[in-house]
Image (cartoon, rainbow, N blue to C red):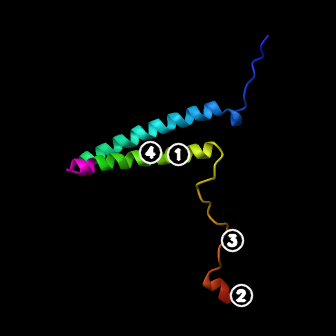
Amino acid sequence: MAENKQIPPPYDLNAKWDACLDLTVRRFVYSSFAGAFGGLLFFRSPVTRWASVAFGAGLGLGSAYTECSQKFGGYPTKFLPPKISDAPASQEEQETD
């Protein structure tokens, strides 16, 4: 009859899209709530309160975009520290040589 074919996890795009959509919605909502709470706590004007909500939503969307681009094989966003041999020598080491 029909064979049950499993798609390997690196090539399963539906699971990646589902995970990214879930992550985006959660981060958007949570950071919007955090912005609303911060706006109520720190600001009096409705305009600045809405600005803090928008700022929180933007942070949530940006962080979700970054993580989703990593899941789809995008460029790594975290910089690695330089190796010891790649770092420039200090003044003391240069004087002794």
Marked residue nearer the N-terminal end (2 or 3) = 3
Q: Which mark is residue 86?
A: 3
Depth-wise, is mark 1 or mark 2 nearer the camera? Answer: 1
On the rendered structure, is 55 left or right of 10?
left
Residue 56 among magenta residues: no
54 to the left or right of 1 = left
Q: Residues within 10 Å of mark 2 (few under 14, many from 20)?
A: few
Q: Nearer the viewer, residue 96 or 28?
A: 28
Residue 74 located left or right of residue 21? right
Residue 97 got which mark?
2
Q: Which comes before the other along the chain, label 4 or label 3?
A: 4
Residue drawn at point x = 35 percent, y = 43 percent: 34
Q: Nearer the viewer, mark 1 or mark 3?
A: 1
Amino acid type at mark 1: Tyr
For disc 1, the marked residue is 65
Residue occupying image coordinates x 70% and y 35%: 11
How many callouts does the rendering have?
A: 4
Answer with mark 1 or mark 2, whichever residue precedes in sequence.
1
In the rendered structure, does residue 43 fall within the stretch colored magenta? yes
The answer to whether 58 appears left or right of 44 in the picture is right
| Label 1 Cα crowd, 10 Å radius (few <14 / some 14-19 / many 20+) | some
Query: Label 1 vs label 2: CA separation?
Result: 48 Å
Q: Position of residue 53 (x, y in %)?
A: 33, 45
| Separation (CA) of disc 2 from disc 3 | 17 Å
Extreme-top residue of the structure: 1
